[in-house]
Image (cartoon, rainbow, N blue to C red):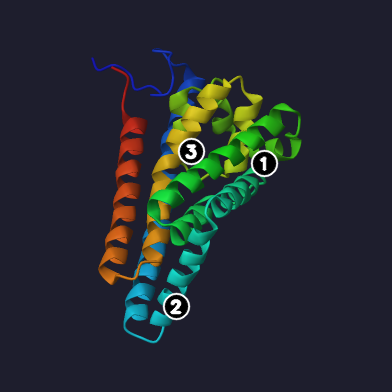
Amino acid sequence: MNPPASDPLSSDPTPNSSEQSMQAHVQAETGKSMRRENRRVLIMVAVIALFMIVAHFTPLKAWITNVQIWKQFVDDLGWLAHFAFIAMCAVGVMIGLPRLPLCAAAGLIFGFMEGLILSLSGSVLGSYGAFMMTRAGARRAVLARAERWPWLKQMLEKPSFLKVFWVRQMMLPGLVLNVLLGVSGVAHSIFLLGTVAGYLPLNLAFTLVGSGLGKGSLAQSLTQLLGALAVVNIVAWLVWRLAKKPRV
């Protein structure tokens, strides 16, 4: 007889009905989230690709030249520009602004590698700031929003590194996740490590998109946009496989 399927994020080999219900919700929400994520990224990449193609063969090409001038100006500011972006990104994420447009902006302004480091640093710092504020007591308003996802609250009662990584892949409000983790018993190190690992895939993809938007070469722009699509689809496939994997 085949062993019963169980939550891959749970350590209990014989899940009760509540845990089975949670697993079903996790699988359903993972599927919906991955489909929404892929659709949004595909639309965004298609729009940007069309814009870049048009820009390279019309007077809009002046926009690309202006971007290069602006990037040189920011580069001349050195560490001051880096510090300012990290601070703005951290504050934005801490108060609940979506982090992915900030990642794209980082790629556009600073280029791929610097943009990835800066956006990841700012995102993690902002999330940790919200986490710390929650533990200091500022949590009621966001906890009320979390009632929309009772299965999520249940899953994060005992969060592990894998659970933190998992929920960071889903299209859920980052502020809600930070607050739920803040009221849980998760260790600071697990929160930080899981958040860094969980943010990395989409930060990488959106930084690639932003960096591609600022390239002077059409071929390089399109290559980076395709790279972003590849990252998103590979991560979605891995997360979905993990959601469907039964305990052996």
Task: Say which element carries label 1.
Answer: helix
Residue at screen point 33% across, 60% down: 225
Please give the count of numbered marks on the rendered protein: 3
Q: Is residue 113 above or below residue 209?
A: above
Q: Position of residue 205 (x, y in %)?
A: 38, 51
Q: Is residue 25 visible?
A: no
Which corner quadrant of the image does residue 212 belong to?
bottom left
Kindly identify which residue carries mark 1.
145
Which corner quadrant of the image does residue 63 belong to?
bottom left
Q: Is residue 238 visible?
A: yes
How crowded is the residue under tag 2: few (<14 C-alpha within 10 Å), some, or many (20+)? few
Q: CA distance from mark 3 to mark 1?
A: 17 Å
Residue 153 as seen in the image, left or right of residue 27: right
* Residue 168: mark: 3
Sequence order check: which comes first, mark 3 or mark 1?
1
Q: Position of residue 167 (x, y in %)?
A: 48, 35
Question: Quadrant where the C terminus lies?
Answer: top left
* Circle 3 or circle 1, nearest the eye: 3
* Residue 237: mark: none
Kindly identify which residue carries mark 2.
63
Q: CA distance from mark 1 to mark 2?
A: 41 Å
Sequence order check: which comes first, mark 2 or mark 3?
2
Sequence order check: which comes first, mark 1 or mark 2?
2
- Looking at the picture, tell me which residue is in the foreground, 151 or 55: 55
